[in-house]
Amino acid sequence: RDHAEQKVYSYIGKQAERKRRGESVAIVVAGCVAQQEGEKLLRRVPEIDLVMGPQYANRIGDLLEDVINGNQVVATEAAPITEDMTRPQRASDVCAWVNIIYGCNERCTYCVVPTTRGVEQSRPRASIRKEMEELASFGYKEVTLLGQNIDAYGRDMEPKQRFSDLLEYLADIDGIERIRYVTSHPRYMSLSVVEAVAKHPKLCQMFHVPFQAGDDDVLKAMGRGHTVEQYLKIIERIRTLLPDAAITADAIVGFPGETEEQFQHTLDLMDTVRFDQVNTAAYSPRPNTPAATWHNQLTEEVKADRLQRINRLATQHALERSERYLGRTLPVLVEGRNPKMTHQVKGRLEQGRPVLFAGDANELKGKIVDVKIIEANAYFLVGEQA
């Protein structure tokens, strides 16, 4: 998200120039930056026709009708999510993404999401299942359930529901061979979710649980609502029930006020857990967030140094985790051709690690095949069909 606003304004400027030249174009700005900027976008770029937040995605037809009628439209007010009966576009015809909860009720001091995406709103589970059954009828084999805080699923409903119960409810859909989900919050993730994954073969043994920092004082300043000890208890639960599961995470370095010692605690946590992958970022102030106003910001040089160091350790651990697959024959869901080496196909293990091996993409795409792992890299594996 670094410099997201500048990138948006830069791109809009090019489209506005087209409109000034007389081209018949409608300029629509949608998403988180649109939600955040609102009417300011129109003041800076009056050629814009429509500004809309994410919660209006399924109402774009109505909004564009207003534009056709000659109106400039700003749709950024909080609004309840209604079911979108249109068929979403998919980037793949093997793996699909299905939203199960929108918005976020957390108030992490660095995060703009609650401001831009609104409060949590869970989808009815029957509608989620219906979408997945339709995907199965089209030949999709894998679904990833999406939510900013997926463990909060159902707590806004009456009566309340649990995410683990939803997983149980979806685990028997014919044709869907694998179900993943992101993102878990350590404050809410329950043992029942781990138990559900252990119970149902279609639920992938892969847990994405961001820790963000390995120091309790930094976590408190971030407003995360959990401690390092609580986080490690979650990891212990996963490793006890599912010792071969992949555990991935997110981390932020250079948060305002973070000392070298506190950063070292983050590296210590990583040494303890040894994640399969850590998505890292240097802290970047976001508009309308508390941390952006604090006076204890770190220099860009310090943040860059810490980012380099955490990435180095993350890659080391990722390679160690990949090496555990060497010599094993494992099921791989083939997603398509490897665009860099067209004689190869690419797929993924249940644990999410990409696998490349020689094969005919036309024949193997969408199938689960046994592959012997013969080469381990930090973030992908190479194998041969068994």
Image (tube, helix red, strand yellow):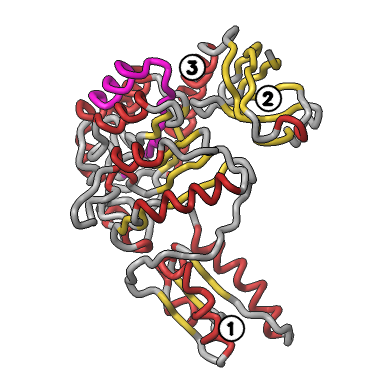
- Between discs 3 and 1, the one toward the N terminus: 1
**Element at label 3:** helix
- Depth check, mark 3 against mark 1: the one in front is 3
Disc on res. 47 = 1
Q: Position of residue 128 (x, y in %)?
A: 41, 52
Q: Marks 3 and 1: CB-CB under 8 Å?
A: no
Residue 347 sits in quarter: top right
Q: Residues within 10 Å of mark 3 (few under 14, many from 20)?
A: many
The residue beneath circle 3 is 321
Q: What stretch of residues is rendered in magenta?
A: 232-255
Q: Residue furthest top?
A: 327
Q: Is residue 163 left or right of residue 98?
A: left
- Between discs 3 and 2, the one toward the N terminus: 3
Q: Residue at x 47, y 38 (%)?
A: 304
- Between discs 1 and 2, the one toward the N terminus: 1
Q: Position of residue 329 (x, y in %)?
A: 59, 12
**Element at label 2:** strand
Q: Position of residue 312 (x, y in %)?
A: 50, 24
Q: Position of residue 147 (x, y in %)?
A: 38, 49
Q: Residues within 10 Å of mark 2 (few under 14, many from 20)?
A: many
Residue 228 sits in quarter: top left
**Is residue 239 inside the magenta stretch?**
yes
Q: Is residue 251 left or right of residue 308?
A: left
Q: Is residue 172 placed above or below 117 in the rendered structure? A: above
Which of 307/41 is in front?
41
